[in-house]
Every structure is written in structure tokens, then in C-alpha cells.
Image (cartoon, grey):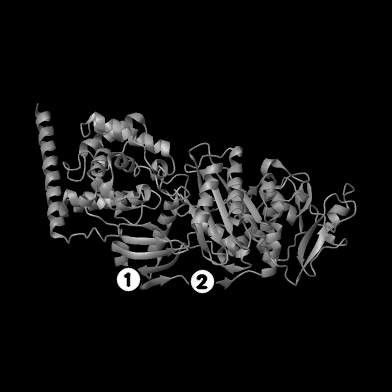
Amino acid sequence: MKKVKKLLKFGMFLIGLFILIISGLILYIKMSPKLEIKSANAFLMYDQSNELFFQGSGNQEWISLNQISDYLVQTTLCTEDKHFYQHQGFDYLRILKALYVNFTSKSKSQGASTISQQYAKNLFLDFDKTWERKLNEMWLTMQLEVHYSKDEILEGYLNTINYGHGMYGIENAAKFYFDKSASDLDLAEAAMLAGIPKSPSNYSPVVNFDLAKKRQVNILYNMYKIGKISEDEYTQAVDQELTIVGEKNYLDVANVMYYQDAVMRELKTIKEIPASYLETGGIKIYTNLDLNAQKILEDSIQHNLTTDKDLQVASVMMEPTTGKIIALVGGRDYNQSQYNRAYQSQRQVGSTMKPLLYYAALESGFTASTTFTSEATTFNFSNNQTYSPQNYGDQYGNKPISLATAIAYSDNIYAVKTHMFLGEDSLVNISKRLGITAQLDEVPSLPLGTASINIIEIASSYAAFANEGYKVTGHLISKVEDLKGNVLYEKRNEKENILNKSLTFILSDLLTTTYDSSFIDYNYPTAIGIAPKIKHKLALKSGTTDTDHWSIGYNKDIVTAVWIGYDDNRNLDTSDYKYSRNIWVEATENYLGDRPDSWYQQPNNVVGVLVNPITGRPAQESDEHKKIMYYIRGTEPTTTDTVFDEYLLDPTN
């Protein structure tokens, strides 16, 4: 009995303490300046054509609650927050129910955010799911509830919520979908719109009318069950034929929110933007987004990545001459996961590291014909350590092969031999020169991509090859203005020449070997499977680790980088490797369309020589395959080169 009394006293103490803390917070909030919700975080985003594609709570179409159809108000309340007018910002019973359902079902299917919480979320400039973010959201929710009436909060919510297709706010949505003002929405139309915010990419009637209709019917039925509408109203609304006037050919880029999130993160790194603007908004952000490229990239992902919902993707498309990121995808579905793998993650890059190594090798006197023997090799070091890399599938030529062949097959033995020959600092140094900031250790395995690098950084390094030697930094923002048009920041396209133009020409040509049938011998080029899909001349390198697969390629017009893998770093199946290649080729070729090849003019000090591509020797009449390879004048191969003695001593050659 004494224990029970002690527990009751302790419980009463905790309740009293909780009430005291809440009362203190409410008193503090009342004494604090009132947050101006109509201008909080007002920001507008424009694409590269200066067309508005995203707007925050600074919506020019802000309308008062009494200008919104009561049908829309009621359908929204019944769908999102039935107890909105009863709670003080947090629906504790709903939270407990959601926790119970999620625990018993071992999922996160149930949410418990109130309209006040969702509105608080809309007032943020980013969408990170962190504890700090949730605490800030709770604090802002309390501020809203203390400073504003329920009607004012609901009004703000309805004027800022996302209805898909870049339509933020009910007035914009009503005009887009039904070509009418929010005040004129009928019950059927209101129920259709009320169903969209849960998942705009799924429940937009422009994207999927059947799915949107099912959700509308479900909302109407729930309203009928709780007595908000009569049976006749329910039946008439369900049977009503709706005319959706939203443009059917509208560029629906469901995952453009990944681009938007990345823009907001980049915005925070720009020192020229005063902190007050980051906190309260009031800015116009001009981005490098190409909506056509974004749609092409998203469509290629959706078309190719159709199985295993856990398999994730990140991809960027970059203008190589400037580093402008014109398209970005940070995951398969923004509504399912806001984690932006294109901006926030670092993954092992595999053999996409090799072009950096081979550029350093070309600087050190290597040519397309330089040979090392491809065979199972164990490297021994002075500290009694050994390293035994393997080629994919244990495929070895067991003979000297040219640098061109090593690139075509992504030969690991050749890469490690080159790395050791140049010195383990060489690859680290060239990587830093190209702008890679990730931690790179001087270890034998570095050229095989054991280091983890962000996709934007690795794509930027390839951009230097693509633009013939100039260092660029991948970026999404070109200019920022305040709402009055005063320029706060403008990106300067300052380029630093860091690579030799003749050597980048040779390297770019070498990277076309990855899908060249001339290199079919004891092995196959790594990307030979997509060769029929490649219509333009493109440089391409893939990269494979147990947990990651990459495809990065370019010409003078575009750099496209694609990564696929699992967030939990589980191993990929070999059947998964095709996804990054197919996404890459489809996105790149669809973007280039009918444009003529945008390849590189041969420098005056570079000569082409017809060679046997596997051996690198000048072509003989008896050679089955012949290919023109490029060399700095004076380094082209001859039949008397001693580098080929290993071949000449072998009677099989």
C-alpha cells in the first residue's frame, strides 16, 4: 500500500511538474514577439528559364478563411485533424494510437501530426527528419497556438500546403485543377483536393485519376460515417463526374523536392545571405534547374527501377562548362523518404575512381599503349603486409594488356600496378586538385574506389575532364534576390585551368572503350550491354563495390552520374548492376535527343595511330581488331618499342 501511495505521489509530482513547465513556456511565448506567419520563410524558387517552380509560405494567392469553400474546410479537417478545434496543438490520444499501431504492425504507417504541427513544418526552409528539427517544430507549434486563433492557423495551413505540381495553397490548387476559386469548390471537388496533400505525387488526379478517385471516395465515406454529410450528399458527390483542367502535359516532376531541399542546404552555405533572411525568408532564389532535364531523369529512374522498393538511387545532371546542376534526384520517392542521397550521402565510388588515376598516369608519361600484365597478383609490402586484389569474375588476360584495354575491362590488377608505380600519393593529389574533399587514404586499394565520396563531388571531377581541363564546383543556385529585387548573391563562373587539354582529349577517348566492341577478346567491355542504346559519342565509366554501383559519363554538353544501392549498405545482387547503366544511358540520350555529337576537337599535338586495341601495338594485317588510338606526338607506339618485348618473347603472340 505504501508503494502505491509513493507511486501516486510521484505521478502527481510529474504531472504537476509537466503543467508547471508548460505554463512557463506558454508565459514565455506570450511575452515573446509574435511570429508574422504571412511572411515567415517567404521564398520563391525559379528555374534556369526564370519560371517559378516552387514557392514557400510567401504565397501571393493568400486568401482569408471565409473565402474558402466550407466543403474544403470540412473535408480537410475530417481528413487531416478531426480534433483541430479541441486540442492545443498536439493530439495526445492520436499520438498514443499511432505509436500503438506502428508498434504492433512494425511499420510507420500511422502519423499523428496535427494541422498546427504540419503548418509549423511548412514554415521551415528544409525538410530534414532530425530530433533538432522535431523539437523546433514542436516549439513553433506552441508559438502558433499561443499567438494565433484556430481560424488563423487553419487559414495559414490552407494557404501553404502542397497540392502537387508546384501548387502551394488552396487558391492556386483550385485554379489549377478546376479553373475556379477556392470559394466555389463543391463537395466532390473539395474531397478530391483534400486527398492530395498526403502524397501529391500519388494522389494528384492529373498523375493518377483512379487512385485520386479512390481516396476521394474514402474521404467522403468517412465524412458520411461521422455525420458531416448525408447519404444523399455522399452518393451525389461520389457519382459526380469531375473535369480536371490541370494541364495533362504538365511537367510532373514528383521528386523535384529533392532539388528544392538541396537548394535550401546550399543557400545556408552562402555567406553573403544575411542570417535574418535564412530565418524569416523574403527571398527569390534563381536556380540552375532545367525542368525538362529533371523530368527526363525522373522518368528514366521510374522506367528502369521498378523492383525492390528498398533499392535506392541518387543522380545528378551537370553542365560541365559551369558546374551548374540542372537536375538532381536524391531517392526513389520523396514522399517515402526525404533523405537526400545526392546531397547528404557519401558512398564507395568503385572503379569510377580509375579515370582520375589514369589522368595522373597520362601526366606521368603513360600512353594508351602502356602495358602491364593482367594476372592474379599478390602485392607484398615491407611490413609483411600483402594485398591480393581480384578482377571482377576472376577474369585475367594472363598477358600484358594496354591501358585502353584496362579501362575497357576495368582491370583491377592494372589499376593497382599503376597506382603503385606512380606512388600512392599521386591519386590523392589529383583528386584534391579536382576538388574532392572526402578523406582519401594513401592505400593500395584507393584506385578501386574504397573511399566514399559524394555524387556531386565525383561528378564535378568528371566535369573537369568534360570541359577540357577546367575545375568547376557543382552548384544549384545562380542568384539570390530579396523580394524587392535587390541582388544579395550572384554566382561567379570563375574557372581554373588545372588539367592539360591534350591529355583530357586522350582520356575522354579512352573512356569510350567501355562500350566498344573492338575490345571484345578474353573479356567484354564493362558497358557493352548498353552499346546499342548509345547514339552519341560519350565517355563512360562504371564502378562496382559489394554495396554500390555507379555509372558516370559525359560529353561537352552534359555530365550524368547515377548511383544505386541500399541505405543499410546491404550487398547488391549482380542483377542490380544494370539499373545504373540503363538509367544513365536513357537519361543522357533522351536529354541530348537529336543534337549532333558534341565531341572534342583533336589538339594539334595529338596524333591518331591504328593499333591492336588489346596489345596497344601498331596494327598488323593479321589483327582481328584494329582501332585508332590517340597519343601525344612523339609518344605513339612503334613495332620496335621495348615495352612489347614481353609479347615478342611469347610465341603465342
How far apart are the alpha carbons under marks 1 and 2? 25 Å
Q: Is residue 622 left or right of residue 254?
A: right
User: Is residue 425 shown left or right of residue 366?
Assistant: left
Q: Position of residue 93 (x, y in %)?
A: 21, 36
Tally of numbered tags: 2
Disc 2 packing (10 Å; few <14; some 14–19; many ≥20): few
Q: Residue at x 50, y 60 (%)?
A: 325
Q: Secondary structure at mark 2?
A: loop
Q: Where is residue 230 shown, x and y percent of the image? A: 22, 31
Q: Is residue 247 above or below residue 637?
A: above
Observer able to see residue 627 = yes
User: Picture coordinates of residue 8 (x, y %)?
Assistant: 11, 33
Pointer 1 residue? 484
Q: Nearer the viewer, residue 589 or 213?
A: 213
For the question of whether residue 454 can be seen, the reply is: no
User: To which quarter of the image does residue 644 belong?
Assistant: bottom right
Q: Amino acid at mark 2?
A: Asn
Q: Secondary structure at mark 1?
A: loop
Which-is-in-front pick, marks 1 and 2?
1
Q: Residue at x 25, y 59 (%)?
A: 38
Q: Amino acid at mark 1?
A: Lys
Residue 92: percent from left, percent from top: 21, 39
What residue is drawn where x is 52% and y is 73%?
494
- Residue at horizontal 82%, vertical 54%? 626
**Which residue was labeled with disc 2?**
493
Mark with earlier residue (1, 2): 1
Up/down of 217 relative to 128, above or below: above
Q: Give the quadrant of the N terminus.
A: top left
Q: Nearer the viewer, residue 513 or 5?
A: 513
The furthest residue to the top: 1
